[in-house]
Image: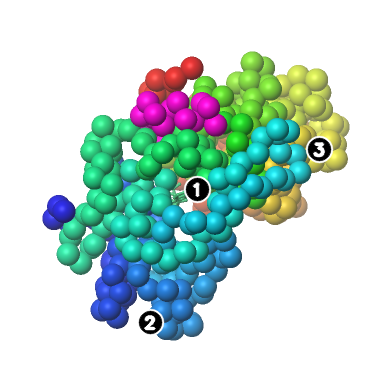
Amino acid sequence: MKNIDLPVSKAARDVVATLQEAGFETYIVGGAIRDILLGREPKDFDIATAATPENVRAVFGRRSCRIIGKRFRLVHVFGGGQLFEVSTFRRAPEKTGAEKRPGAVRGVENDHLIVADNDFGTAKEDAFRRDFTVNALFYDPIKGAIIDHTGMGVADIKSQKVRAIGDPALRFAEDPVRMLRALKLVAQFDFELDNETENALFANLPLLSCAAPSRLSLELEKILLSSYGDRHFEVFHDYGLLKYFLPQLNANWGTPERKRALALLFERNCRVEENVYRNSISLATALLALPFVEKRLTGASGNVYAADQVDADAISRELDRLFAPLTLMIRLKCAAQKILELLPKMVYTSGNGREFMRQHAYCHTREAAIILGIIAGGNGDQLDQRWLKGSENTRDNDRKKPPRKRRPAGGSKR
Ligand code: ATP
Ligand code: MG
């Protein structure tokens, strides 16, 4: 056990302190500790505790928390203007079983798939049911102690290794989404898979077709929101996972549309990282789909289709096709579609940008304007300015920065 003062949010510390004072062993766990040790700012703080969801509700009161989830019951606790996921320590579930779903690859059966995950356990058991050593660190912010139950989490963070906890093949069979999570760590942090984990991943990739599409759709949303989205798709492709995740993007890998899509996404990601624009999932979705929509409407990409070629149905079908077999949330799909419909109108509208913005939903017009700025790149400030001047959501000084150079890519495996 090491004594260390990690920069966790005060609100997270307060939630932990409240539960500990009520007599429940409690820690900050998972991605937040990993991110802090890597010198990154965590996007949220997950908390694990010996308290059951009912205990947690009794401690914080009904007004500050809500029990959610079926497959995995946990409590949302509101504190200090933040939302925390508080989950009870669990042990590896005993109930596993075959699951087939419509659309699953024929012949792919999985007897190890976890169908429920609600057996409560100790802190140590909870660490061992987690996916990777680097995700299984517990931190007690009151004592200033990191607890590394697997004994390898801290070392693996230092040596940038993704190592499954336990038998990697079994862990991937229990939950194939873990393969995607392993490669997210590769994409996001330039980690490498340890040999055994890598071999198990290559051998088990087809099991991903057993994963619930709703969980994969959730992962897709997280990836689109991340400022490493372009890199995620590249790594998924390199490891052969993309064909089980977004088969259309994979099938189009060699095309100019795919290259343009990831280049645009990369440019957007740089600008988000540099705080030029606020992060927006509908913007990222529209940007990824744009070259494919251009191609569908005009037979070529790179033109932001001619004004008379805004066919809303065709755009909708292209969005469905590109993301199948996953389904975008309806709200997300509608927003991305509106942006894609507005783009050519804005390109071909002469006159006052502000007047145009008044006539259309502000949020969609603003995001379409940002996309036009991204397409125009460093020399296209005029387009950018026409639509964005005076918008309180952009920072003019930042916007004048030259476009960033590509991050050094991690070594790909295939
Ligand atoms: P991110 O930065 O994407 O949020 P994360 O590691 O925090 O990364 P979460 O989905 O928030 O990912 O999960 C929180 C923690 O729960 C993980 O760090 C890991 O310990 C555990 N976990 C999540 N998904 C799984 C899984 N499929 N199997 C085992 N453990 C998991
Ligand atoms: Mg997390």
Which numbered mark, 2 or 1, is in the foreground of this view?
Answer: 2
Magenta-colored span? 184-204
- Tell me the mark number nearer the camera, choosing from 2 and 3: 2
Between 139 and 408, the residue placed more toward the observer is: 139
Please report the residue visible at 33 percent of the width from the left and 43 percent of the height from the top: 133
- Asked whether the viewer can see residue 73, the reply is yes
Tag on residue 317?
3
- Check disc 2 and report its element: helix, strand or loop: helix
55 w.r.t. 245: above or below: below
**Residue 27 spot, x, y in % from top left:** 30, 63
The kind of secondary structure element at disc 3 is helix
The residue that label 2 is drawn on is 59
Question: Is 181 placed left or right of 282 in the picture?
Answer: left
* Residue 196 located within the stretch drawn in magenta: yes
Q: Quadrant of residue 48?
A: bottom left
Three-letter residue code for mark 2? Val
In this view, the residue in front, 252 or 179, is: 179
Earlier-in-chain disc, 2 versus 3: 2
Q: Are marks 1 and 3 in contact (CB under 8 Å)?
A: no
Tell me the kind of residue under disc 1. Answer: Arg
Residue 398: name its quadrant.
top left
Task: Name the residue that disc number 1 marks.
Answer: 278
Look at the image and say whether residue 51 sits in the magenta stretch. no
